[in-house]
Image (cartoon, rainbow, N blue to C red):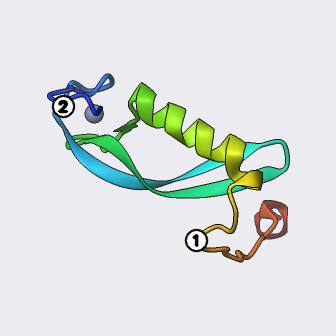
Amino acid sequence: MMIKGYNCYYCGGSTAPDEINYEACWGEQRILIQDAPVLRCERCHEIFLAPDVLDIIKKIAQEEPKIGEPELIIRMPVRSYQVYYT
Ligand SMILES: [Zn+2]
């Protein structure tokens, strides 16, 4: 359950419910978990995930190889920072 009335740890601003796409990584594996519920600071925009949300994200990531076809598979371009830095 999301914590109501939580104030931002960093700036003390009030927070409001929002959703993010959370990229979970372990080893060389990555998974994008869409629409994870968070609280977002209305002042500095920092996001906060409740412990139970993190538990569910961890469970999805751990079980990903065995829970069947994902809703979507995306391709993304990869660019080396070094190519553009020099
Ligand atoms: Zn804040």
- Quadrant of the image containing the C terminus: bottom right
| Mark 1 Cβ inside 8 Å of ligand 1 | no
Task: Name which residue lies at 78% across and 70% down.
Answer: 79
Q: Secondary structure at mark 2?
A: loop
The dot on residue 71 is 1
Distance in Å between CA atoms under marks 2 and 1: 35 Å
| Residue 16 placement, left or right of 28 | left
- Quadrant of the image containing the N terminus: top left
Give the residue type at disc 2: Gly
Q: Nearer the viewer, mark 2 or mark 1?
A: 1
For disc 1, the neighbor class at 10 Å (few under 14, some 14 to 19, many from 20) is: few
Front residue of 72/14: it is 72
Above/below status of 12 relative to 77: above
Going from N to C along the chain, the mark reached first, 2 or 1, is: 2
Residue 53 lies, in percent from the top left, at 44, 36
Q: Which residue is mark 2?
A: 13
Front residue of 32/1: it is 1
Residue 47 lies, in percent from the top left, at 37, 40
Above/below status of 19 relative to 26: below
Give the residue type at disc 1: Glu
Task: Name which residue lies at 51% across and 38% down.
Answer: 56
Above/below status of 80 relative to 64: below
| Mark 2 Cβ inside 8 Å of ligand 1 | yes
Above/below status of 5 relative to 56: above
